[in-house]
Amino acid sequence: MPPHKAQKIDLNGDYPCPCRRRGRLVPITLTEAFGCDRCQQIFVVDESGYSLEQLSTHYPYKQIWQWRGHQWSRTGTGIRSHYLSLALGMLLVPLVIWLPLALYTPGPNIILWAMVAVMLAMLPALMVWLAYRR
C-alpha cells in the first residue's frame, strides 16, 4: 500500500512534473529548485523540504504540491475552500444594492431594473467561476 504521508523531497531525486504527466523535474544547479523538461515551469522546495511550490504561475493563488511516494498531491487550496461563500456574496451584494433602487424608482421600469440587477449580480460570479474553474 502506498504511503499517505508526505515524504521529504530529495533535491537529487527523480520526480514527474506535478502539472504535466509526461514531464520530468530536473534539479537546477546551486538552488533548491526544479525545472520541468517539458513545460518549462520552475518549482521551489520550501524550507521544510516537504512541499514544492510553482513559481511562474498565472493563477492568483499559489500552487503547492507534496510528494506522496508515487505521485504529487496538491495541498494549497487557495480560494477553492471559500468558493461557495465568495460566489454567494458576489451574487447577494449587488442584489441588495440594486433591488431597493429598482423598487423605489417610479414608473414601469421595475422589470428593466430587476433584470439589470440580476445581470450585474451574475457578472462577478461568472468571472470568479471562469477564473477558478480548473
Image: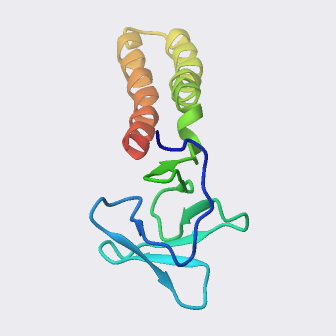
Query: In the current view of this chain or complex, which residue is farthest to the bottom?
Result: 30
48 horizontally vs 79: left or right = right
Front one among 123 and 83: 83
Residue 61 position (above or below residue 89): below
Q: Which residue occupies 43% across, 30% down?
A: 120
Q: Position of residue 132 (x, y in %)?
A: 43, 43
Front one among 2 and 126: 2
Residue 114 position (above or below residue 78): above
Query: In the current view of this chain or complex, which residue is farthest to the front?
Result: 1
Q: Position of residue 126 (x, y in %)?
A: 38, 35
Residue 73 position (above or below residue 52): above
Q: Quadrant of the C terminus?
A: top left
| The quadrant where residue 127 appears | top left
60 horizontally vs 132: left or right = right
Scheme by which the image is coloured: rainbow
Front one among 75 and 133: 75
Query: In the current view of this chain or complex, which residue is farthest to the right?
Result: 48
Q: Which residue occupies 60% across, 50% down?
A: 6
Q: Position of residue 50 (x, y in %)?
A: 64, 59
119 horizontally vs 11: left or right = left
Q: Position of residue 70 (x, y in %)?
A: 43, 53
Residue 54 position (above or below residue 40): above
Q: Which residue occupies 36% across, 76% down?
A: 40
The number of discs equals: 0
| The quadrant where residue 66 appears | bottom right
Front one among 72 and 13: 13
| The quadrant where residue 119 appears | top left
